[in-house]
Image: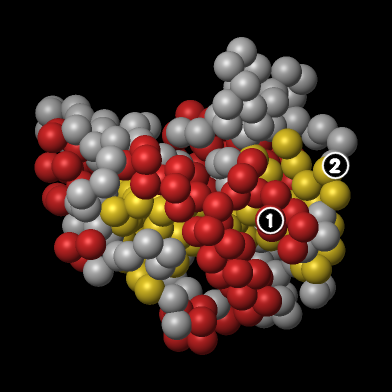
Amino acid sequence: MAPPSSEEPAAASGAGAISKVLVVIAMQTEALPLVTRFQLVEAAARFPKGAPWTRYHGDYKGLHIDLVWPGKDPVLGVDSVGTVSAALVTYASIQFLKPDLIINAGTAGGFKARGAGIGDVFLASDVAFHDRRIPIPVFDSYGIGARKTFETPNIVKELNLKVGKLSTGDSLDMSPHDETAILSNEATVKDMEGAAVAYVADLFSTPAIFVKAVTDIVDGEKPTAEEFLQNLISVTMALDQAVMQVVDFISGKCISDL
C-alpha cells in the first residue's frame, strides 16, 4: 500500500471547487441504488491484492465520484460491515483516490427519545464510539474518540436535513454497557462505521460528512434485527435520495461553501 501522502486535498483549504468526492458505504444493498443513480461503473482494482473491496466511479455534474464498499467477506460471503473494514477501505481510498471530500452514507438505528423516526435522514454533527471501554485516565477519552464532524451549515439549511450526534460500535444490538455509553454520547443515531471513517479522515485532513438514514428504532419495541431487515430496502431509497441531493448541492462549490 502506498505510504501516506504529505499533500492535503486541493479543496481542503477551501480554495477551488470540489472535484473529487468519495462515497464510503458499508452494504451492497445501500451502494447499488447510488451506483445506478450516478451511472457509475465498476472500476478495475486499485487496492492491494486480496482485498475484497469494490470501487465504482464516474462523472456527475462536474464531479468525479468514487463509491467504495468493503465487499463481501471472503469466507462467509456477507457484507464486510463494521469499523475494521470501514477504516481500512477509507485509508486505502484516501491514499489511492485522493478525494477532496468524503461522504459516509448508510443506514443506522435511531432513538425516538431524541426525535428519530423510521426513514429520517440525519447529518451527523459529532461522532463517537460506544464500545471501546478503556477505564484508564486519558485512554478512556481515546476509546470514546469523540470528535466534531466537518460543519456543513449551508447543506443543512438548503436541504432541511435533521442533525444529530452519531455513535458507532461493532454490534447491531445494544448491550447495557453500550446503552450507557450511547446516552453519555447524547447520540440520536447509532451505526457500525461512522466514527472509524471519521478517525481516518481526520488523520489525513480530509473533510468528511455523514449521511445516515434510520432503519430501526433502538429504544422501540421491535427487535433490532427484525426491524432493520424489514425497513432496509425502503429506507435505502430515502438514503439514495438524500445523498443525491447532497451531491447536487456540492456540485460547483468549494469546501468553504458547504
**Residue name at image x 25 percent, y 57 percent:** 111
Residue 199: quadrant of the picture: top left
The amino acid type, in three-letter code, at marker 2 is Ala
Q: Residue at x 68, y 56 (%)?
A: 33
Query: Residue 164: x and y, percent?
Result: 32, 65
| Residue where numbered disc 1 is placed | 33
Distance from Cα at disc 2 to Cα at disc 1 = 17 Å
Of helix, strand and loop, which one carries label 2? Answer: loop
Of pointers 2 and 1, the one earlier in the residue sequence: 1
Q: Position of residue 197 (x, y in %)?
A: 49, 45
The one nearer the camera, 75 or 195, is 75
Q: Residues within 10 Å of mark 1 (few under 14, many from 20)?
A: some
Mark 2 and mark 1 residues within 8 Å of each other at the beta carbon:
no
The image shows residue 80, relative to residue 6, as above or below, that is above
Q: Is residue 57 left or right of residue 32?
A: right
Residue 122 visible to the viewer: no
Which label belongs to residue 43?
2
Tell which of 73 and 146 is nearer to you.
73
130 relative position to 2: left or right: left
Labels 2, 1: front one: 1
**Up/down of 124 relative to 220, above or below:** below
Q: Amino acid at mark 1?
A: Pro
Badge number at residue 1: none
Q: Nearer the viewer, residue 251 or 107?
A: 107
User: Which residue is rendered at x = 70% and y = 49% of the image?
Assistant: 32
Bin the neighbour count of mark 2 within 10 Å (Cα to Cα): few under 14, some 14-19, many 20 and up: few
